[in-house]
Image (cartoon, helix red, strand yellow):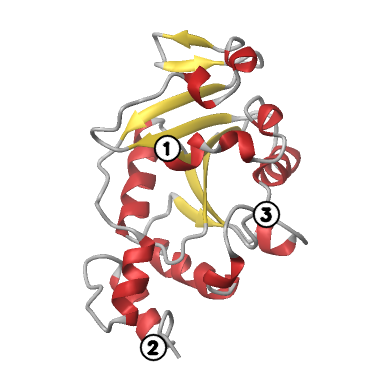
Amino acid sequence: MKWGLFGGTFNPIHLGHLRCAEEVREMFALDKVVFVPAALPPLKDAQDILPFHHREQMIKLSIRSNLSFSVTDVEHKREGKSYTIDTVRHFIDTFPDPTELYFVLGQDAFDDITQWKEWDTLLTLCHFVVMTRPGYRGKNLADIITDNFASRFTYDGETKGYRGPTGKSIFFRKLTFLDISASDIRNRVKQEQSIMFLVPDPVRHYILDNSLYRTT
C-alpha cells in the first residue's frame, strides 16, 4: 500500500488543494490520500484559524465522491501543537510495515522545513512530495536544509528524487496549480463577494450557512 499524507490548515479547503491531491495520487500511484488538517499549527497564529470541526467537515464535504481520499482527526485528538513528526510516527506505528508513506506539502512550506520539530529525523521516516508552482525557480537541496544533511541524499535519475540514507526520497514535482488561496477566499467572504468555482459547492454552502469568515 502507498498512502499520501496531505497536511495543512485547510482554512478552507479549496479546488487547488483537491486538484493537487489528485495529481499527486496519480503521479505516484497512491492507493489513498489522507488529508491531515492541523489542530494547532506551530508556525501559524491559531486565532486566524477556524475551529477544527468546521475545517474537518468542509474536507469531508469536498472528498465524499472520491473513494481514494479520506480525512483524519489524529492531530485534533492529540494534545498540544500539531507536529508533523508525531503524525508520521502515528501512521508508522498504526499501519503495517508494507505501507509506504508520502508526505505531501507545498514548496513554501518545505522551504521552512528546518523550523519544524525534529526535521532531520522526519526526512528519514517517509517520502516527501514537494509541490512546486510553474515558473518556480527551484533551489538546491543544500539551499533548504543544512549542507551536512543534504550531502546524505543522492539524486536518483530513475525516480527523479533525492534518495536519503534510509531509502526515503524527496521529490520535487510541478503540478497544475490553480491560482487560488485560502486567504483570498476568506477575504472574499468578508467582503460578501462570490467564492463560486473557488471551492466545491457543498463547501461554499457550508461557509454561507454557518456564517464563517465574516467580520463581526
Q: Secondary structure at mark 1?
A: helix
* Helix, strand or loop at mark 3: loop
| Lateral position of residue 186 relative to residue 150, left or right | left
Q: Position of residue 126 (x, y in %)?
A: 61, 30
> Quarter of the image containing the C terminus?
bottom left
Q: Earlier in the sequence, mark 1 or mark 2?
A: 1
Q: Position of residue 146 (x, y in %)?
A: 60, 20
Amino acid under label 2? Asp
The reply, left or right, for residue 195 in relation to residue 58 is left
Residue that appears at 39% across and 88% down: 209
Nearer the observer, 33 or 56? 56
- Please identify, in this view, whether the residue under mark 1 or under mark 2 is nearer the observer: 1
172 shown above or below 162:
below
Q: Residues within 10 Å of mark 3 (few under 14, many from 20)?
A: many
Looking at the image, is mark 2 or mark 3 earlier in the sequence? Answer: 3
Which label is found at residue 107? 1
* Residue 165 location (% of width, % of height): 65, 13
Residue lying furthest bottom = 216
Q: Which residue is mark 2?
A: 209
Q: In the rendered structure, which disc, 3 or 1, sits on the residue that comes first in sequence?
A: 3
The residue tagged 3 is 82
Disc 1 packing (10 Å; few <14; some 14–19; many ≥20): many
Q: Residue at x 40, y 84 (%)?
A: 214
Q: Which of the 4 image quadrants contains residue 159? A: top left
How far apart marks 1 and 2 lie (CA) works out to 33 Å
Callout 3–callout 1 Cβ contact below 8 Å: no
- Where on the picture, by quarter, is residue 151? top right
* Relative depth, front residue between 165 and 22: 165
**How far is disc 2 from disc 3 in space, using C-alphas?**
29 Å
Name the amino acid, label 1: Gln
